[in-house]
Image (cartoon, grey):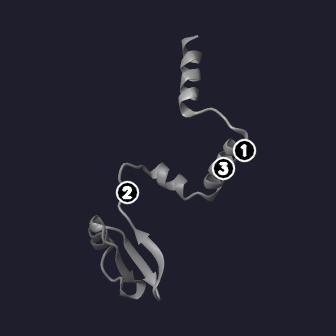
């Protein structure tokens, strides 16, 4: 994968042109050499997934849930599916 870097002051092409360049790998925009933004192609996703993956409140909820799971234990995905299947059959 190729990462293309473009300095913000030099980023004069259209957004469409940068999207086409992102086919080869991320296009990273820098400001005085520091990365400030990236354009990456999204595959197998939807707008809701993208929104949630950048939502600080949702990310904190996931972090605390994982910490609680590690601390207190819980059900595996397979166990939860089995229990739900039993519940539906009853």
SS for dot 2: loop
- The vertical placement of 54 against 4, above or below, is above
Circle 1 packing at 10 Å, graded few (<14), some (14-19), many (20+), is: few
Q: Is residue 3 left or right of residue 71?
A: left
Q: Which residue is mark 2?
A: 42
Q: Nearer the viewer, residue 86 or 45?
A: 86
Q: Secondary structure at mark 3?
A: helix
Q: Position of residue 2 (x, y in %)?
A: 30, 71
Residue at the image position 47 percent from the left and 78 percent from the top: 35
Report the residue marked by disc 3: 61
Q: Are marks 2 and 1 in contact (CB under 8 Å)?
A: no
The mark nearer the N terminus, 1 or 3, is 3
Q: What is the quadrant of the C terminus in the image?
A: top right
Q: Nearer the viewer, mark 2 or mark 1?
A: 1
Q: Is residue 51 above or below residue 14?
A: above
Separation of disc 2 and disc 1 at Cα?
34 Å
Write the residue at 64% across / 47% down.
66
Residue 71: mark in rendering: 1
Distance from disc 2 to disc 3, alpha carbons, whole Å, reads 24 Å
Q: Residue furthest top?
A: 90
First in sequence, mark 2 or 1: give its number: 2
Compare residues 47 and 74 and report the one nearer the observer.
74
Image position, residue 43 (x, y; %): 35, 53
């Amino acid at each position: 994968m190729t990462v293309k870097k473009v300095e913000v002051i030099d980023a004069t092409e259209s957004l469409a042109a940068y999207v086409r360049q992102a086919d080869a790998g991320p296009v990273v925009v820098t400001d005085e050499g520091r990365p400030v933004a990236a354009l990456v192609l999204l595959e197998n996703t939807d707008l809701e997934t993208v929104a949630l993956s950048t939502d600080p409140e949702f990310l904190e909820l996931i972090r605390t849930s994982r910490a609680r799971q590690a601390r207190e234990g819980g059900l595996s995905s397979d166990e939860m599916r089995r229990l739900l299947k039993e519940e539906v059959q009853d």
